[in-house]
Every structure is written in structure tokens, then in C-alpha cells.
Amino acid sequence: MTLAPSRDSGSPTGSAAAGSASGRSGAAYDRADWASAFRNVLGELDRVPLNAVRGTIPPDLAGTLYRNGPGRLERGGHWLHHPFDGDGMITALRFEAGQAVLTNRFVRTEGWLEEEAAGRFLYRGVFGSQKPGGLLANAFDLRMKNIANTHVVRLGDQLLALWEASSPHALDPDTLETRGLTLLDGVLGKGEAFSAHPRFDPGHHGEPRMVTFGVKAGPRSTIRLMEFAASGPRAGQLLADRHDSVAGFAFLHDFAITPRYAVFLQNAVAFNPLPFVAGLKGAAQCLASKPGEQGHFLIVPRPGATAAGDSAAEPTAPIVVPAPEGFVFHHLNAFEDAATGELVVDSIFYDDFPSIDPGVDFRAVDFDTLPAGRLVRTRIDLEHRTAASTVLEERCCEFAMVNPERQGLDARYGWTAVAECERGNAPLQAIEKLDLHTGERRVWSAAPRGFVSEPVMVPRPATATSAPRAEDDGWVLNLVWNGARCASDLVILHAADLSEQAVLELPLAIPYGLHGSWAPLG
């Protein structure tokens, strides 16, 4: 695989591979290369040293990149219907003094242990995976296996493997050994939903916080907003907690924060549980957009905030504002515009809820039939409760982030995974840096045979003698599926210009993952 250098203005950097599949955009990729990443992880490694095959590991990159994602997609010859139903596997890449080591380990959930012993799947999956045995084996079996496969974050002396439909699993941050389910010192009830998308407040309220939520969905839904101390001796201590009841079924995967608000987008979707109960579909396949209906922003005041037009010190009700048409999984960031008084939210919008129907092999999915994600900026007038949106990026994108020190503030730069083609839907093969103030773009591409994952931006560490750092001073870390060698690479890019710092070929084939995080040393 040739990993091309960055180019300006979002120009494609890879050429089409022979025998590749073409979408409506005309861009090409090799479907066999893309599909080759869907496999089982066959081993667990412990602190295996890694060497850069190109470039050098920056000596001041010090910490651990944690990644989570499905690592088990098949048992006993039976393949899952959707990779998001796969058991969680954590990868840890630890950097210190210009050296790197790799550790990976499956999360020892109760369901994983049961199925390992049985040698077959014993549970249905939320995204449509069925147990062997056909309809009779699946109908009326409403049990859910906590697969702990969506995100992984460090909170105090614990590493949390997250799956938003239930409780987190606590792991040892160094060995990745599973300590077991955690209710966070009694904060959570048994089996209570706990988001897989926490946001880390860098210190808007005097100290770093992990802000997160849980949802109990139904005809009326309850959103629980929680804030935990994220550093020091109080790390993991609950600092704030509130519950809000909202009308309608709330499907919420992500949210955004500002110093004063937690911002949710309640998509206009309905849930019909009957096909799930009957064993015909997974729970997520029972979601469908409501034609002609509009979603809503739910703007929940954080502790100490005052809503527009509300003189109370602690307002009790969320602000509800109609949202633009479309469906949102992920947000890039949000901030309060001091010049206009507006709340600004940057989100990845799809024209409709993307789903894989029963009977469709996810390895053979037709990208042209799925909506492409676009980065959209919404400006919300809190006083009049109106919103106006503009498209920031038409290119198909997902998994966006800002410098974590600018979380909740007016960030100038965003880094996101994008398709190689300029228009239409296709696998994610490039990393884009977008100047959110000017619209300038830079793109690093892994095409034609590489496929990227969520970029993680790591700011360069500050020192007592260092000059003030630029917002884009640091690195972007990315796990890339290398179709040429059917294994994974860790690519380190300079965050400022996306030039290549180092490429590490991993002795491991890691399937496409979901989310990850960076934990600095110390």
C-alpha cells in the first residue's frame, strides 16, 4: 500500500486499483481489500514492541492510544449479520521516549465467556444478528448481551469499556485485564444505560470533567445527564446529576457540550418492537425515520448555567428547538458564539437513518444505496428557539473531532475520516483537516488499498518553558486497514499539515473499530 502525502484543497491522492468497485461518484476502491478487514482476532498480545517502518515516533508523544471495536464476528461457522454486534476487543498502543508497545485483549463479558465455552453464539444482536436455529430459536428471546464494543476511556485508575445499552466494564489500564461490570460506586443501577459517547470538558468549570448521559427510551424518554471529576484524587466522583423527561422515543448515540449546555439531537425516528419480539429483526433494525417529521435539539443546561430568558440559577427544563432535516449519529463540537449570542453545533447529517436490511451480507453492502454523511453547522437562536444550517463539508465523512483542549469552544480546526471520492458514499479512505473558519482543507489518503478509522488528535504536551502552542500543534493517530498485507497499520500524522510522521505495521489484523481515546502518561 502506498500512503500518499497530504494535498491541499481536498484533492484525491490515490489512484483507482485494478478490479475495484465504482460508485456513482466515479471514485474507485477494491472491495476485496475493504471486506478483508472483517475477520476474527485470533490472538491476544502483551506489550509487543513496535518499530516504525517509515519515519520515527516523536519522542514527546507520551501516553496510550486505546481503541475499541468488534473483534469476534464469527463462531462455529456462523457469521454475525452486522459487525456492530461483535464482541468488544481493546487495543492499547503505549508510547514513551520514542518507543511503542502493543497490547490487545477481549473484554471478558459474561456473554463472551459463555459463548467461548459453548463455541457458538447464544445471544441475538441489537443490529440483527441471530442465534443459530432459525426463527424458533430467536423469537421471544429478548435478552441482550453486553458486548462492551463501542468506546474505551480512562477515568481515574479504571479503563471503561462502553456499550450504551448497559453498564460499563472496568479494565486494568495497563494489562487490559477485565475487572468486571462497574456501577461507578453506586451511581448506576444494575443494567442502567450508560452512553458510549462521553465528552471530556477540559476545565470550563474549574477542573476537567467527564460529561456523559444515559437514556431510558419509550413513548416518553428520560435523559440522565451526569458529570464526573476526570483527574486528580477525585477522579470518578459524581459532581452533577439531573434527569429530564422528553416527549417521544429518544434515540441518542452522541451529544455535544459547551460550558453552559449539553446539546442533544433527538432524531425523528419511531421504534416498532414487534419484529424484534417475533425474532425477525434486531432492535436497531426496528428503528425507522418518521416521514415528514422533524427532529429536535434538546439543550440541557449544565450546573451553574442559566437558560436564555430564565432568571433561575438552575433551570429545570431543556430548551427545545426544531432541528434540520436528516439523521445524526455524531457531532463534531459545539460552542457559544459570543458575537451573536447563538449556540453553534457542528454535526454529521445523513438524509435518512442508515441500516442494513435482513438478508444483506454486510461485506457486500452497496454503498450507493446508503446515505452519505455531510458535516453541517447549525446556528441556534436560543431566545427565539429557531435554527439555521449550512453545509461545511459535502464530502462523505464520519468520526470527527477537534483538539480536545477546544472541546466546547470555538475550535478552528476539525479532523475527520472521509471518503476518497469528492461526492457520494464510499468507504472511508482518507483523513481530512478542515479549517472551520476559512473552509481550507488538507487531505492525507491511504487509497487505493488502505481504509481509515476514527482519527484521534493528540495535542503536543506543554512544558514550563515551551511557547504557547498552536491549536493544530500535535499529531493525528489513525489505525489503517492495509489491504495489501491484510493487517493493520498505525499511522502518525502531523496535525498541522497531515504530513506523515511515522508508520507502524502492527502484528495484528484488527477489524474496523468504533471509537478510541488518548490517555497521557502521568
Image: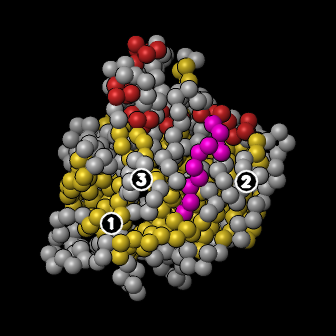
Residue 443 placement: quadrant: bottom right
Q: Secondary structure at mark 2?
A: loop
The nearer-to-camera label among 2 and 3 is 3
Q: Which residue is mark 3?
A: 292
Q: Neighbour class for label 3 at 10 Å: few (<14), some, many (≥20)?
A: few
At x 44% / y 35%, what residue is drawn? Answer: 285
Amino acid on which disc 1 is placed: Val
In-front residue for pair 468/297: 297
Horizontal side of 74 relative to 222 (left or right) equals right
Which residue range is magenta in the image? 365-375
Disc marking residue 351:
none
Q: Position of residue 193 (x, y in %)?
A: 29, 43
Name which of mark 3 and mark 1 comes first in the sequence: 3
Amino acid on which disc 3 is placed: Gly
**From the viewer's perspective, is residue 291 above or below residue 234?**
above
Name which of mark 2 and mark 1 comes first in the sequence: 2
